[in-house]
Amino acid sequence: MNPIEQFELQRIAPYFINGVDVSFTNSALYMLLAASAAIIVTLFTTSKRALVPGRGQALAEVLYEFVANTVRQTAGKEGMRFFPFVFTLFTFILMSNLIGLVPYTFSLSSQIVITFAFAAFVILLVILYGLYRNGFGFLKLFVPHGVPAPVLVVLIPIEIISFLSRPVSLSVRLFANILAGHITLAVFGGFVVMLLGAGAWAALAPIPILAVVAMYALELLVNCLQAFVFAVLTCVYLNDAIHPGH
Amino acid sequence: MADASSFQLIGAGLAAIGTGAAAIGVGLIFGNFVNGALRNPSAAAGQFTNAIIGAALAEGLGIFAFLIAILLYLK
C-alpha cells in the first residue's frame, strides 16, 4: 500500500485546449465541495435570524465572533475591512481540511499549488494594500525603529529576506502539516494490513487501529488549528500593511 | 561501496532529526506559556493567540526539515 497514492490527481472529465490540460480533476471537485459546504453552512444557519439563537445560528455566531476577534486582536480595528477576506479564507481551508479527513476523500490542502496560490495572494494583497495606503512609507516595514545605523546594514537585508520567505513558509506550513498527517494515517493503516497478513501476529492488529483512532483525533485538532494559524498569520501580515514601521 | 540511493536514505534520516528539534521549540513555547499562565491566569487568555503563532512559526521550520526528508525518501 502506497501512502502517497491518496494525493494523486485524477481527471474526472478530461479536457484539453491546444494541448493544455484543463481537465476537471478530483481537486477541482473538492474545491467546489469545500466552497459550497462553507456557503451552505453559513446560509442555512443564518436563514432565520432569531434574537435567541438556535443551535445552527449559535454555530454561525461562534464562527463569526471567533474570526472577528482574531482579526480585531491582531490587525486592529482598521483590519476589520479585511474581515470578509479572512473569514472566507478561514472557512474554505477549514471545510477543505475537514472534508479531507473523511476516509477515501481527497485533501485539498495537501497540494502545494493550492496553498501557495493562497499564500501568494495574501502576500500580494499585503504589498499592494501597503503601498496603496502608505505609499513609500510602506518600506519602513524593513527599517526597524530605534536601531543604530551600523546595525541597519545587517538588519535590512534580514528583514527583506524574512518578508520574502513568508509566502513560502505560509504555504508550506499548511501543505506539509496536512500531508504529514495523512501520510501518518495511511502508514499506520498499512501496519494493520501487514499484521493481518502475518499469521499469528494478526493478534497484534488492534494496536495500530487504536493508534489510528488516537491520531485521527490529533489530526482533527491539527486541521482546525492549521486553518486558524493560516488566518492568524494572514492578519499579522495584513497588520504590517496597515501599520508599517514597528 | 554504497550507491547514491542509499545515501539519499541516510540524508532523509538526517533531515528528519530537524523535526525533533522543532518539537523541542514547540515544547519550550507551550511550557513557558503554561508557566506564565499559572503565575498570572487572568492574562493567559489574551496571550494564547501569541503562543499559537509562536508555535506555528517554530513548527514551520520543523516542517521544512520533514519536507526535505520526504523529498529525499521519495525521489
Image (cartoon, rainbow, N blue to C red):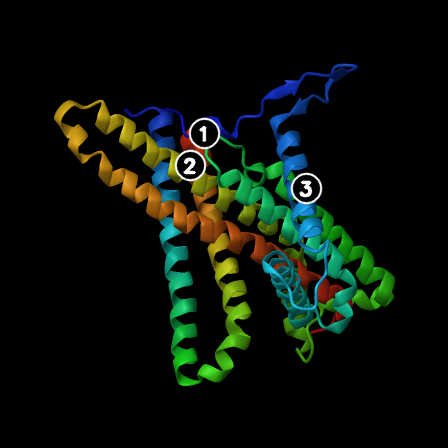
Residue A109 placement (x, y as % from top left):
57, 41
In the displayed structure, does residue A148 sit left or right of residue A209? right
Q: Hey, what amino acid is under mark 2?
A: Ile
Label 3 vs 1, first from the N-terminus:
1
The residue labelled by disc 2 is A183
> In the displayed structure, would residue A76 be above or below residue A23?
below
To the question of a shared chain for discs 2 and 1, the answer is yes
The residue labelled by disc 3 is A35
Q: Residue at x 51, y 64 (%)?
A: B52
Rounded to the nearest angstrom, the CA distance separating label 2 from label 3 is: 25 Å
Secondary structure under the numbered disc 3 in the rendered image: helix
In the displayed structure, does residue A173 sit left or right of residue A40? left
Q: Check disc 2: other Cα within 10 Å, few if <14, some if 14-19, many if 20+.
A: some
Secondary structure under the numbered disc 2 in the rendered image: helix
- The subunit letter for the residue under badge 1 reads A
The reply to whether dot 2 and dot 1 touch (C-beta < 8 Å) is yes
Rounded to the nearest angstrom, the CA distance separating label 2 from label 1 is: 7 Å
Q: Nearer the viewer, mark 3 or mark 1?
A: 3
Image quarter for residue A241? bottom right
Q: Nearer the viewer, residue A244 or B32?
A: B32
Check residue A4 in the rendering and tell me which mark sits there, or answer none: 1
Label 2 vs 3, first from the N-terminus:
3
- The subunit letter for the residue under badge 2 reads A
Secondary structure under the numbered disc 1 in the rendered image: loop
Q: Name the outermost residue toward the left.
A: A200
Q: Nearer the viewer, residue A94 or A42?
A: A42
To the question of a shared chain for discs 3 and 1, the answer is yes
